[in-house]
Amino acid sequence: MGEIEKKRKELKYTQEEIARKTGITRQYYNSIENNKKKPSVSLAKQLSEVMEVDWTIFFE
């Protein structure tokens, strides 16, 4: 389990909930969580606000 998935589960969010809060599809969020795609800096900052993490975690 990666850090992003671990944090999402710690917050008790589903992938669908994170996607809805940031205006992306669940499939796109899943690709980000599984390191298949990298978000734009602006989306990473949105995700970081929702997930209470530093935005750079999405580029590690």
Image (spheres, rainbow, N blue to C red):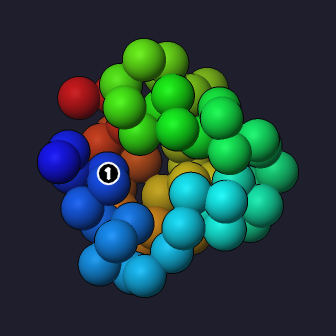
Residue at x-position 43% and y-position 82%: 12
**Would you place residue 42 above or below residue 9 in this image?**
above
- Residue 45 visible: yes
Residue at x-position 39% and y-position 66%: 8
Number of numbered callouts drawn: 1
On the image, the x and y values in percent for residue 49 come to 54, 66
**Would you place residue 39 above or below residue 4 in this image?**
above
Answer left or right for 44 relative to 5: right
On the image, the x and y values in percent for residue 45 come to 56, 49
**On-image quarter of the C terminus:** top left
Residue linked to disc 1:
4
Answer left or right for 33 relative to 57: right
**Would you place residue 40 above or below residue 7 in this image?**
above
Q: Nearer the viewer, residue 15 or 54?
A: 15
Q: Residues within 10 Å of mark 1 (few under 14, many from 20)?
A: some
Q: Nearer the viewer, residue 39 or 8?
A: 8
**Would you place residue 14 above or below residue 48 in this image?**
below
On the image, the x and y values in percent for residue 34 come to 37, 31
Q: Amino acid at mark 1?
A: Ile
Instruction: Please tell me in which quadrant of the rendered image residue 24 appears.
Output: top right
Residue at x-position 42% and y-position 17%: 36
* Callout 1 secondary element: helix
Answer left or right for 43 relative to 12: right
- Residue 41 visible: no
On the image, the x and y values in percent for residue 52 come to 41, 72
